[in-house]
Image: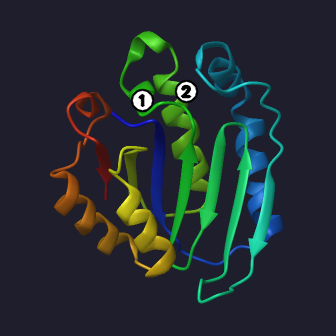
Amino acid sequence: MGTHIDCIIPKEKNYSVEEIKSKLKSVYDRLKPEYSQLEKHGTFTKNSNGNWWISLIPSENGNPEYITGEGDSFNIDVYGKVIHIGCIERFSSLYMTDKNISNELYKIITEISKEFRKSDKILIGAGGFGETDHIMDMAFSENADFEKICVKMTELNGIPATELTELKDKSWYLKK
């Protein structure tokens, strides 16, 4: 279930490219041991260094302006009403504790998200097999907010997990 991880949080304010870089670097500096664990035991994380490429993509051809970036197996997209945080590690890494990265991976994702939110709202979904494709399109093309995305995820994928251990049987997690 899922070739990667997609996380959506509400966008509570606007950020500059430099603010985003600074926040992401701050998370890396605080969580170096967790990133190191991902390097050792993760499938795809190699040579993490806290450097992010971040760029403002101007609106064109009817598409909205947004900010996007990549760094250390993660990516970020800052849309009109939500922020997407992605990770190339397998979704199953969140609940298969034998991989020895579940706690670290969850901590990195939630700490990145906390840099950009004050609320507890967070959605984590299995990406890659269609579970999150529609909501990603909604976030970008329709400027959908967090609540609208949660409603669509429930419609498409059923009731979410409320604990990480439930992810073995569910394709998404929601905390409100």
Instruction: Name the residue furthest bottom.
Output: 62
Residue 158 in picture, x, y percent from top left: 15, 52
Residue plotted at (47% across, 30% down) = 90
The residue at which mark 1 appears reads as 94
Residue 6 in picture, x, y percent from top left: 47, 49
Residue 61 in picture, x, y percent from top left: 64, 87
Visible residue check, residue 121: no
Instruction: Name the residue furthest top.
Output: 98
Residue 6 vs residue 23, the one in the foreground: 6
Residue 84 in picture, x, y percent from top left: 53, 59
CB contact under 8 Å: marks 2 and 1: no
User: Would you say 60 lies left or right of 82 here?
Assistant: right
Where 109 falls versus 7 (above or below)? Answer: above
Q: Quadrant of the C terminus?
A: bottom left
For marks 2 and 1 on the same chain, the one whose residue lies earlier in the sequence? 1
- Which element is circle 1 on? helix
Residue 120 vs residue 131, the one in the foreground: 131
Mark 2 vs mark 1, CA separation in Å: 9 Å
Residue plotted at (45% across, 64% down) = 136
Which amino acid, by three-letter code, is at mark 1? Leu
Q: Which mark is residue 104?
A: 2
- Which element is circle 2 on? helix
User: Would you say 133 lies left or right of 114 here?
Assistant: left
**Image quadrant where residue 29 sits:** top right
Q: Residues within 10 Å of mark 1 (few under 14, many from 20)?
A: many
Q: Quadrant of the N terminus?
A: top left
